Amino acid sequence: MTEHINLFDNVNRQFDEAADILEMPQEVRDVLKTPYREVSVALPIRMDDGSLKVFHGFRVQHNGVRGPQKGGIRYHPDVDLDDVRALASLMTWKTAVVNIPFGGAKGGVQCDPSKMSLHELEAVTRRYIAKISMVLGPTRDIPAPDVNTNAQTMAWVMDEYGRKAGYQPACVTGKPIELGGSQGREAATGKGVAIITREACSVLGIPLKGARVVLQGFGNVGSYTAKFLDEMGAIIVAVADHTGGVRNAGGMDVTALTTHVKANKGGVAGFTGGEAFDAESVFAQDCDILIPAALGGVINKVTAPDVKAKLVVEGANAPTTTGADHILRDKGITVIPDILANAGGVTVSYFEWVQNLQQFFWDEAEVFQKEEKIMIQAFHDVHGKVTKHGCTYRTGAFVLALERVYKANLMRGW
């Protein structure tokens, strides 16, 4: 049993809860909700078997009033325009929460990378960038990796964009180190999730050392989140992904699990350091902290009643629906929202952009130090709104973001 979710409607309902607190006029809400530009393109690609296949790509630029639009590109068979609108909107609020000089954008291509060769993925990427390059650029819109894209994908993005614009490493972030990428970028989102989890546990009175953690998703975000939380003394008791679930009440060896996943092309199934369980029951696992770190809409009216955690920290984008938010709140479960919890990725993307513009680079320790400072400040800025308005952390984060974007828009002119 599942719940049908329109992610864009869901984000806008979250927006409205914060706008109500701010008593924001409807005309202002309409302006701030509406994407600035939407691009849809068809991508005909000659496949390795000689067939011609048409893929569909999207790029949505939501708001650029505080700086160039910023947001990843995801490759997934189910991605659609509403999903990309929602994710672009979230990027606007996310960059405002951590107070970096970006707006929000997002991109997506309807494809299944697991069924495509490297040559086919490169062809799709280059055709996609060639068709949307007129709306991209270091001072206009800067892509980055997202679901099923990585540093190699971003290298193709930079190269394709450079065919017309010349050498422009600041046109994209999440690149390989050899092509101007930043130290620490791959681990940045997971590092940020761990930092925010630590700060939340501190104010909520949950001892992080010995806390039992369950993760849904063990890709880039989930694996690094597990690594850093393990180093902080938390115990990873269960992990689930698209291949299955594995749990160990005594705690799992995170390094061994990560090695297993890399060796098995991204799946936790078959890991011998714990017992297998049905991945669909991951939200019902007994724990102190639950971290959804995969796709959106997974904690919904169907799954939320089973959540046993004291704290939910959103490593994924839009993993919790508005209806589920209310269920969790009524159960006394605190939710740290995506626009705060997983903002470490875009924060270090900002560092990469700055380094590219200057052609001056920092080492990993300095990158992580700068990231930690921004993430801690953002958490306590949001906590201040929660205390002031007596609201949830999600609404507090939206209040903070809306205030910053609204003021910038007002000063620049509507």
Image (cartoon, helix red, strand yellow):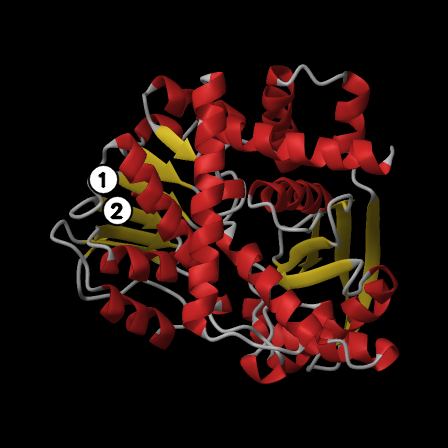
> In the rendered image of this protein, does residue 25 appear above or below residue 171?
above
100 vs 11, nearest the viewer:
100
The quarter of the picture where the C terminus appears is: top right
Q: Position of residue 319 (x, y in %)?
A: 49, 40
In front of the other: 308 or 208? 208
Is residue 191 positioned above or below 63 on the image?
below
- Numbered tag placed on residue 403 in the rendering: none
Q: CA distance from mark 1 to mark 2?
A: 6 Å
- Toward the viewer: 221 or 339? 339
Q: Residue at label 1?
A: 287
Within 10 Å of disc 1 (Cα), the crowding (few <14, some 14-19, many 20+) is many
Q: Residue at x 50, y 30 (%)?
A: 394
Whichever of labels 1 and 2 marks the residue nearer the N terminus, that label is 2
Identify the residue shown where x is 83% and y is 52%: 39
Asked where in the image residue 225 lies, by quadrant, the reply is bottom left
**Is there CB contact under 8 Å for labels 1 and 2?**
yes
- Can residue 315 be seen by looking at this rendering? no
Q: Quadrant of residue 28?
A: top right
Question: What amino acid does circle 1 point to?
Answer: Cys
Q: Is 171 positioned to the left or the right of 335 in the image?
A: right
- According to the picture, the residue beneath numbered tag 2 turns out to be 213
Identify the residue at horizontal 42%, vertical 55% (top origin): 372
Residue 246, relative to residue 302: is it above or below?
below
Q: Which amino acid is tagged 2?
A: Val
